[in-house]
Amino acid sequence: MLNATSAHPTALEEPPSQCSGEVGIWLRRAACAKPCRIALLVNLARNAKPAPRRITPPDLLVELDSDANVQSYARALQDGGHEVLIREGDPYLAEWLDEQRPDLCFNTCEGFRGDSREAQIPALLEMMGVRYTGPTPLAAAITHDKPTTKRILHFYGLPTPPFQVFETPDDLLRPELEFPLFVKPAHEGTGMGVHNESVVHDERALRDRVAWCIEAYQQPALVETFIEGRDLTCGLVGNGQRVHFFPITEVDFSGYPPELLPIYGSIQKVDLDHLYRNKCPAPIGPKLTAAVQQLTHQTFLVTGCRDFARVDFRLDAHDRLFILEINALPGIAPRSDLTLMAEAEGWTHGELVRSVLGAALIRYNMVSFEHGLR
């Protein structure tokens, strides 16, 4: 169990007590056990109004949803027998929620601005006493800030590459950090700011990339040891010890143009999505599979995530695993990584969406575990 008082704290050391396959069945059934009035909260890219800046990176809005994605979420919830009300997660949301009185909010809001933008809607919902899916304000803020996540992982003895936060391009480089290094924005997701130039081999390239990153994304840069190896990701749904792991995915970079380095950035995720290939389940053997699942669950718990999450890893040539980050509000669009993992074991996109809802319904005691399994 978690031990926050020990001088050498340890994360969860045992696998979840509930059979993963059984939990998956339970969550999908629970989502359809009780018809609800659900507010589907979204942030559409077409509603974004980015502040003017000297450098506007092309991937600035990639985390925001399209109308097609929103309709896919709505259909999934409606197919579970629920009434769905779609609403933009904007500054005027509180009044609308007070009028509509939903049973629960299905939150997909990434936020439009701010270092803790993914925490804004959860904070509002907490203040209003409205039930919702996904991370709390604290968990959303922690996981959206990659350096904070890495500090927590380090505290619990979980493997993550050594790192340093650069507030300016002129910050002194810590002597224990050796090249090659990897530079990315401190507060972004969906591979934002991750390109060939993110891998730097000398100090001049490092400072040039840090300067660009800070200017383009208006936030500090995270610099960490670059781990050469295989790119793995593991997703789960559920809460506590009752979670369902999806098959682990390995990104197959062979489908992308050869001039692109084997790193999973926004160009690969969004611009070249049609070239995406994966190996799911990843061919890493049962021992490493168990290790990835255990680290995924540990990271889920120590960062305070709820209902669903996805953890990204690098596996080096010596079969050592390194946790890169956790996404507490992972994409669940029809082409998202978590969706493709679910589909690899026979789930539909709708079943994935409803399983997230099922996890929240159980957590709020709106549906019992026994009811979900009937």
Image: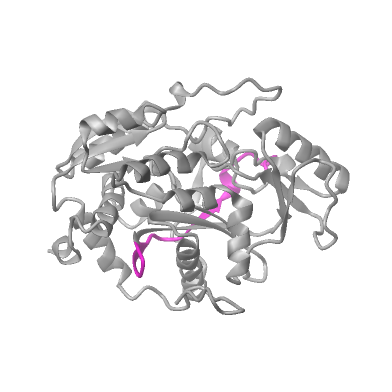
Q: How many marks?
A: 0
Q: Quadrant of the C terminus?
A: bottom left
Front residue of 49/282: it is 49
Indicate the position of residue 203 as horizontal and vertical percent values.
87, 47
Q: Quadrant of the N terminus?
A: bottom left
Q: Is residue 158 visible?
A: no
Q: Residue at x 30, y 36 (%)?
A: 40
Scheme of colours in the image: one colour
Tell me the quarter of the picture where residue 121 sits.
Answer: top left
Tell me the quarter of the picture where residue 92 sits.
Answer: top left
Indicate the position of residue 327 as horizontal and vertical percent values.
49, 51
Q: Residue at x 53, y 30 (%)?
A: 61
Q: Residue at x 63, y 63 (%)?
A: 160
Q: Quick check: 136 above or below 95?
A: below
Residue 29 colored magenta? no
Indicate the position of residue 317 as horizontal and vertical percent values.
67, 67
Indicate the position of residue 352 as horizontal and vertical percent values.
31, 50
Tell me the quarter of the picture where residue 36 sits.
Answer: top left
Front residue of 228/87: it is 87
Q: Quick check: 156 above or below 323?
A: below
Q: Is residue 291 visible?
A: yes
Q: Quick check: 251 above or below 81?
A: below
**Magenta part of the protein: which range?**
239-260
Q: Residue at x 49, y 60 (%)?
A: 303
Front residue of 368/352: it is 368
Q: Is residue 346 left or right of residue 293?
A: left
Residue 251 colored magenta? yes
Q: Is residue 133 left or right of residue 268?
A: left
